[in-house]
Amino acid sequence: MAALPYRNGKKGVEGRQNISAVESASGRVANGLQAGSNSGQEHPPFEGADVRTDRSACRRSRKKRKGVRSMGRYPFIVYAEEYLERREISLAKSSLEEFRRKAKFLNKKLAELKDAKRISTSSPRKMNEADIRAIIKWMDEEGHENSYKAKNLGFIKAICEYAGNNVFAKMRADGIDLPKKTPKELRTLTMEELNKILRVADELKGWSGEVTKFLAWMYPFTGLRASELRQAHLEDIDIKRWTVWVRHPKGEKRYARKRTVSILPPARGAVLRYLEIRKERLVAKGFESEFLIPAYHGGVYSATGFRRMKANLENKVNLDLDDNISFNIKGFRSTFCQQNVDRGVPIEAVAIAMGHASTKTTETFYGRMRPDMALAKLNAAWGDGVELDTSEAKKAPVVDGPILKPRLIDKKFEVSGYA
């Protein structure tokens, strides 16, 4: 990886010099003099046109190399990798991998926009307002949702700020609105779709088939994150109380707390079956493993390995379907949330089970009360036979005379201030 550029120094990036280039040019001068001496020339060491030419070449090389570090054709990925390297301590491994994939994707797209002359530069140090607007227009043309645009712009903003470019702050100060994350319609699996997935999973063979089957039952009925189950140990599961202790929650290095989650009744039979098959497999292979889901070598599965098993299951589920059932491991977590909310479990309890600090995250991204259920609960709370007491209203005095009109809100008043 390239060295970090100077920031806030006395000379700044523009004052940086490439000493090796000067040394290389000086070496060429010395070699030229040595060659001239060996060839029998009678000129003194610093006489002759060739020496002056080499001196000029040295100065030109030094002048050419002086200034901003060259980052080649892809400056965005250079800054992005430096930024993520500094965030390694504070970011979870899964988040770091996701950001690196995003960095590679955006680097490719920015290079394409630069080649098409839609942006002036792909360097986060030099991007201006016109470039940011062009990037937004590109995402608009591809029909992306605001949440997708906001995520990409948020990452580009972080890299620009790291490179010393405050273009986003200037745009905000000028009152320019950028795409914001908006709550999108939640899509969770229906019970019919989930049952179809579980039926197909139960038919899978081999060790990877048993693992896939275990995942398909555990995720929708525990609410665990993908990494939380993948990194679980055998001792973390308690079949007497039907719980799983989460020893590696998301964000454990910064904010998360370890928690215990329930294994809901539908998954318990599958858990007992898996534990028995796991025991038989380890005996047959002649090794032990502390992990709840040991890989072929006895260690822990990678995130890619889990995604590959999910993809294989998804392909088999959709073999004989006209309308494909699209799902992912995170979708199982959303299904856990929505199914419990639909059953009347308080959202606070669901948020705690999912490891959320507040119910806002739960309701925004995973599940919330459906409108028809909200209306039904409102009607049920009042009942069918509730009658209003109008006795006090009947006692109200009747006022004779002109009815005073209420004062109207002035037309120039800012109505957005009214709740």
Image (spheres, rainbow, N blue to C red):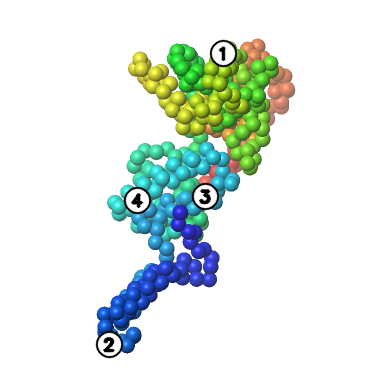
Could you tell me if the residues under marks 3 and 1 are in contact, i.e. CB atoms within 8 Å?
no
Q: Cα distance, mark 4 to mark 1? A: 52 Å
**Residue 42 vertical position relative to residue 134 in the rendered view, above or below:** below
Viewer-side label of 2, 4: 2
How packed mark 4 is, by other alpha carbons closer than 10 Å (few <14, some 14-19, many 20 or more), is some
- Decide which of 412, 46 is in the foreground and name it: 46
Per the image, the residue denoted by label 2 is: 42
- Name the mark on residue 273: 1
Foreground pick, 304 / 150: 304
Is the C-beta separation of discs 3 and 2 under 8 Å? no
Q: Mark 3 points at which residue?
A: 85
Say the numbered circle drawn on residue 111: 4
Q: What element carries label 2?
A: loop
Q: Mark 1: which amino acid?
A: Arg
Q: Earlier in the sequence, mark 1 or mark 2?
A: 2
Q: Can residue 402 be seen in this view?
A: no
Figure quadrant of the C terminus: top right
Whether residues under marks 2 and 4 lie with C-beta atoms below 8 angstroms apart, the answer is: no
**Real-space Cα separation, disc 3 to disc 2, in angstroms:** 58 Å
Q: Callout 2: few (<14), some (14-19), or many (20+) C-alpha neighbours within 10 Å?
A: few
